[in-house]
Image (cartoon, grey):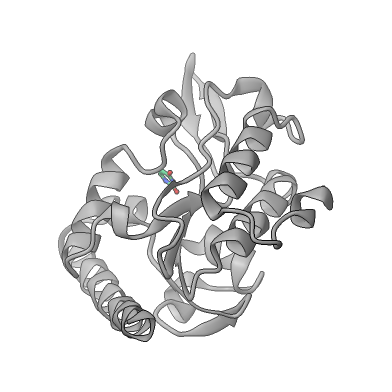
Amino acid sequence: MDSLFDTAEGGEDRGERLSELARQVSVCTKCELAMSRTNTVFGSGDPYSPLMLVGEGPGENEDATGLPFVGRAGKLLDDILAAVSLTRDDVYLTNIVKCRAAVEENGRLRNRQPRTGEVNACNPYLQAQIEAIKPEIILCLGGPAAKTLIDKNFRITKDRGKWYEVFGAKAMATFHPAYVLRQHGEDLQNTKRLVWKDIQNVYAEYQKAMERRG
Ligand code: URA
């Protein structure tokens, strides 16, 4: 897996570097998720954006299309980004695992959290994406992404909304859109309020990064 990092520097075009990584991911068999996937889901968006969003992993719709965040959670993510006048094309969007994690229940597949071994197997791809894109800001969507990138003991309810430093980037975590969708009534309002506050703070950093670029 070390070879993933070997060509990250050296003037190579960022898009080409990511295409090569995506090709490697598309044939990856490093964990058992490879056995049941339809498509790998590498990432999408602007590889030159200062802002990278990292979710948990593909669900049914993402597995079917090969694109991140295309289901209900993705629609909510679009709304969250729109609240600060961003679209998914303004950011780079990926996940901690690139294949769907699911469990069979009553003859149907239900999404499940990726296991530690699966996250670890996939982590070099995420690291290589970060090395290629060099984001100035990373927003982790949900606890699993925050535990992977910020701190293994990260607690989303306690630690979200705070800034950390990760790979030379400012990193924050907020609630995963799918978690938001599972809330009701007052909990839903409170959770949304916190996510909207977090995205405002992330956007302030995004604007600073854009100003620095001129
Ligand atoms: N949830 C995620 O964490 N990632 C996706 O791509 C879709 C849903």
Residue at the location (29% across, 76% down)? Answer: 203
Establish if 102 lies above or below 46. above
Residue at the location (54% across, 62% down)? Answer: 133
Residue at the location (44% across, 62% down)? Answer: 48
Residue 80 lies in quadrant:
bottom left
Residue 92 lies in quadrant:
bottom left
Establish if 129 lies above or below 162. above
Establish if 93 lies above or below 213. above
65 or 109, nearer to the observer: 65
The residue positioned farthest toward the right in the image shown: 2
The quadrant of the picture occupied by the C terminus is: bottom left
Q: Position of residue 158 (x, y in %)?
A: 46, 80
Q: Is there any visible trace of residue 141 in the rendered image? A: no
Q: Quadrant of ligand 1?
A: top left
The residue positioned farthest toward the top in the image shown: 107
Q: Position of residue 96 (x, y in %)?
A: 57, 52
Residue 154 lies in quadrant:
bottom right
Q: Position of residue 98 (x, y in %)?
A: 57, 40
42 or 110, nearer to the observer: 42
Q: How many marks?
A: 0
Q: Is there any visible trace of residue 156 in the rendered image? A: yes
104 or 69, nearer to the observer: 69
Q: Taking 94 as reference, is 25 left or right?
A: right
Residue at the location (67% across, 45% down)? Answer: 115
191 or 126, nearer to the observer: 126
Q: Position of residue 164 (x, y in %)?
A: 54, 83
